[in-house]
Structures are given as C-alpha cells and as structure tokens.
Amino acid sequence: MGTLQELLDLIHLDQDSSNLFVGSNFVTPWGRVFGGQVLAQALHAASRTVPEDRTAHSLHAYFILPGDVNVPIEYQVDRSRDGRSFTTRRVAALQKGEIIFIMACSFQTREKGLEHQLPMPNVPGPENVLSDQEWYASLKDKLPDLYRRYQFPQPIEFRPIERYNPLAPSSQPPFRHIWMRVRDTMPEDPRIHQQVLAYASDYNLLSTAYMPHQLQARIDRVMFASLDHAMWFHEDFRMDDWLLYAVDSPSAGNSRGFTRGNIFTREGKLIASVTQEGLIRLMQPKAD
C-alpha cells in the first residue's frame, strides 16, 4: 500500500445497510490486521451515520482479537444518541461472526469556548531527519529479517528524531518525537483527515515503551499488539502538512506498555492527543 489513494480506498467502506459497513484489509508483513486500519475504518463507519456539520472529538477503543488479514471486516454501528450538540456512536468490528474490536466515539458541532494548550516541544525540524524507509534500507544487508518486517510501501512518511539502533542497542528514556505527513495532497473533508490521523496514530506508540529495553531483546524478538486506544481531536489540521507526534511511556509491566502522545502542527498548535496500552511480550528464540 504505497499511495494515498490506496490508503483512502482501504479506509472507505462498502455500505450493506444503514448501520452495516464492510471493509477489506491491508496485508501486513507481520500477518495480523494493523490496529490503525481498524481504528480508521471504524471511525469512517461511524462518521457515515452522523450529520455533516459534526466532526469527531473523541474515540475510545478496545482490540479484542487479532484480525485475520484474509477475511473482510464487518462494522456494525449503533446510533446511541443524536443530541443538539453531540452525537454518540458505538461500533463493533466482526470477523467470522466474532467481535474483534469495539469503539465508542463522539461527534460535536463547532462551538466557541475557552482555549489553552501545552507548548510544543522544541525539537529539530523534519528536513534533516531520516525517514523510516531510509533507515530500514540501511539495515537491509546486515539485518535482512528486520528489514523485511518493517520496510514496506507506506503513504505516510515518518521521520523519528529518536530511534532505536539494533546494531548498537542502548537503554534510552521512553520519549520520542516523530514528524509525519501524507506524501500526497489530501481531500478537503476534515473527517478524512481525522480518519487518516487515526490510522497513523497507532504507529510509534509501543516502540516508545520499548526504548529503555533495547539491551534485553532486539525489536524483532518482541511481540507488540495494541490492547486499547483513545484519541481526542482538539483542532482542525491537514495530514499533508508536517505534524509532530510527541510520545512518552510512563510505565511498562506485566507484559504491557502504557503510552501517551500529543500531536502538533509545525506552527505549534496542539491538534490531537492519544493514549494507548499494548502488549509487549518477549518471544522465545526459534530452535535451530
């Protein structure tokens, strides 16, 4: 999936009835449905049942079962409430009759109100930072398995300022700053920008919780899986402009990592916040 249009086609769902939508899957190198895909598709399904004057302001989701990339996903939308200012929806994602994911999300009309925000971190700009694809390409000969797992066409460009180096692992603080943007021009609809950001927000969270533990296990010997994901949209934004994802991990334990992220425009506006807890499980080495 190397182009923006392929990503938009993936997020866009077929509608079987007023509350039932069906979507296809991106076939990931790791063999399970990518959590960001399900977040984006579920938000898309909910948005299709909401008046056009309302955009999402929050979502709260649980990943219940691993998704099978070979089976289409059905999204059942429950129209929980339609209020004067807020609209609430619940979405269940199913494969083979089993619920693999649930999400509650809320939409709001635009209103004036009190405003404040945290300042944007002072970090280098994206111009002189290697992209993920450039970095993994440099590992192709020395770590071919790692290269095959993480190097694939991606319509969103990620440029992490702090990154782990499997050739020279070290214990680093659980903080990361990642520049990201879509490589092509996005449509104008702000809902589509929200859905693409939901897709992108599932990247780089659990790897931040891994940063202090590089000496314990190489990253391709750790299993990562999202368990829950919450997101708040504060302001309008464009996914084809640079955004800074400032991520930290306050805690890890019991094979779980907890992470938080704030997302800023290049001009310093805080446009979204994210929290996630995920599975971080050491895999047993393969027998010779």
Image (spheres, rainbow, N blue to C red):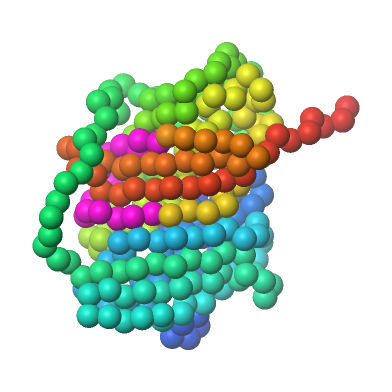
Mark yes or no: residue 170 visible: yes
Front residue of 127/5: it is: 127
Q: Residue at x 31, y 21 (%)?
A: 128
* x and y, in percent, of residue 33 in the image: 60, 55
Q: Residue furthest bottom?
A: 17
- Direction from residue 194 to residue 218 in the image, left or right: right
* x and y, in percent, of residue 164 in the image: 52, 23
Mark yes or no: residue 185 visible: no
232 in the magenta segment: yes
* x and y, in percent, of residue 244 in the image: 31, 37
Question: Which segment did they paint magenta?
Answer: 231-247
Q: Residue at x 25, y 63 (%)?
A: 189
Front residue of 25/204: it is: 204
Q: Residue furthest top?
A: 168
125 in the magenta segment: no
Q: Residue at x 63, y 19 (%)?
A: 215
Work out which quarter of the rendered image holds the C terminus and state it.
Answer: top right
Q: How many marks?
A: 0
Q: Residue furthest right?
A: 288
- Direction from residue 128 to residue 217 in the image, left or right: right
Front residue of 53/90: it is: 90
Q: Residue at x 52, y 35 (%)?
A: 251
